[in-house]
Amino acid sequence: MQTKQKLAKDDILKIFKQGCKTEQTIGLEYERLPIFSATSKACDYSSEFGICNFLRNFAREENWDYITDDYNIIGLKQEHDTITLEPGCQLELSIKPEKLIFDLKNKLNKIDTFMQPILNKFGIKLLGYGVSPLSTNKNIHLIPKKRYEIMAKYLWGILSDVMMRETAGVQCCIDFSSEEDAMEKYRTANKLSPFMTAMFANSPIRGGVDTGYKSFRALSWLNTDNDRCGFVGRIEDNVSFDDYVDYLLETPMIFINRGDSVIPLNGKLTFSEFMQNNDYDAEIEDFELHANLYFPDVRLRNFIEIRNHDCVGKGLQYSIPAIYKGILYNKTAIDEINDLFKDFEYKDFAEARYNVPKTAMNTKIGKYFIKDYAKEILYIAEKSLIEMNTNEEKFLEPIKELAEQGICPADILIKNWYGLWNKDIKNLIKYVS
């Protein structure tokens, strides 16, 4: 009888190498916070007008298929697009990657248009905002998805429950053509990370009060799990797929799937130890799950997933992919960004990342402030997009307007909170709806 061959590192590396593509597209994952219009509280999962019944109604009206976990509806799919639920009922639209941001916007607008009558019927608003404005994690129950229960018990950071139940963000997905191309984009995206978090900071008010932070969402990720979250720290020139896999192999595992069962491992084994363990035969699917439970700001898959932005609206959600497309799909633009940051070391980026949640655009890095560099970043991205001749530079206009004033979305919210809104949560919600 032939012995089953153990999973090897070379098997894992194939996942990343197979991601190399000749065609370069851009993807968008857009999470929003659903609240009940009447109370401003976070939507629940199972009540008559909760998110589960909203999904059920939308699926019936628009002919989407259910995504289930142990017979519970946890999302919907139609061809390559999905609507899924994050742990605290946050609603995420994942749009099939496209060559043009215009196509992403059109698809998202189309889905929103179909959803709106049903949202109105259920008395639900979707907020373009980074953290639950009124309800806190103690009053937000997890959706009935087995992995979330295990994750909630395992993640040890003091704000892990906030991250899981209260926060929403915008993620951008970028293609690569080779390992060299992937790692150059990966390094550049990591360097951009604290600057982008600052530019799109949009979560100062939480639980009905000013938290003192411009991005409470970013703060929560800093306090979730140091083993798997945050700024990955590999920005040197020779970083490779092999180095990234090594990080993952030495990261503690949370759980594995076997058939219909979820088996907690609770950090007792790293993946490299699991591969040598005799209790289970490690499978490539185990690694893919493990890699999906690793949450750095910039994550490598068979594409590059950039994850460090608060949820924003008012057109700013399209500024995010526009910046990355302009910079990461143009070698000259990448070189210009690296030249802009040439005097910084890893510790400078890491220190900025830890300060950005509180001070955003007024965070100091080197001799200057992030707001000073933001204008240069946008100039480089805009110049590149103009060269592409796709008219996508127009998506930079909302963020350019803020950057020229040296502010982020949170600064507008805080000014109004203490001014016209008189600390009334309903005014905030109206603004971010």
Image (cartoon, rainbow, N blue to C red):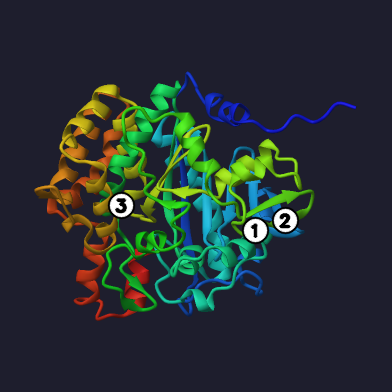
Secondary element under disc 1, as helix, strand or loop, is: helix
Q: Quadrant of the N terminus?
A: top right
Is there CB contact under 8 Å for labels 1 and 2? yes
- Which of the numbered marks, if any, corresponds to residue 147? 1
Name the residue tied to disc 2: 262
**Mark 1 vs 2, N-terminal side:** 1
Q: Judge whether 23 appears above or below 188 on screen.
A: above
- Is residue 138 visible in this depiction of the protein? yes
Percent of width and height locating residue 115: 55, 56
Residue type, mark 1 in image: Arg
Secondary element under disc 3, as helix, strand or loop, is: helix
Name the residue tied to disc 3: 197
Residue type, mark 2 in image: Val
For the residue carrying disc 2, how many other residues have a C-alpha within 10 Å: few (<14), some (14-19), or many (20+)? few
Residue type, mark 3 in image: Thr
In screen coordinates, is 352 left or right of 48? left
